[in-house]
Amino acid sequence: MTVVFELPSYEIVEQDGHYSDEEIQEFRETVEKGAHLFFKYARQGGLKFA
């Protein structure tokens, strides 16, 4: 099951699965709270894992 949000609009661009409105709202809030980190690490070229 998948939900993909577009940034910075936070619109759903892909959804596979049956999520409740409450679950979608929780996902959206998580993305909104973390968006600044997504942009920060994207500017730095991503995360490097050993």
Image (tube, rainbow, N blue to C red):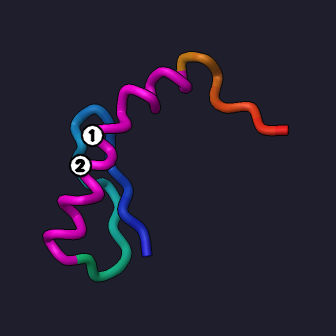
**Residue at image point 19% right, 77% down:** 20
**Residue at image point 36% right, 33% down:** 35
Quarter where residue 14 is shown: bottom left
Q: Is residue 15 left or right of residue 11?
A: right
Quarter where residue 22 is shown: bottom left
Q: Is residue 50 left or right of residue 9?
A: right
Assign a secondary structure to mark 2: helix
Amino acid beneath label 1: Glu
The magenta-colored residue range is 20-42
Q: Position of residue 11 (x, y in %)?
A: 22, 48
Q: Is residue 37 left or right of residue 47?
A: left
Q: Position of residue 38 (x, y in %)?
A: 46, 32
Label 2–label 1 contact, CB within 8 A: yes
Which label belongs to residue 32?
Answer: 1
Q: Position of residue 2 (x, y in %)?
A: 42, 68
Amino acid beneath label 2: Glu
Q: Residue furthest bottom?
A: 18
Q: Quadrant of the C terminus?
A: top right
Assign a secondary structure to mark 1: helix
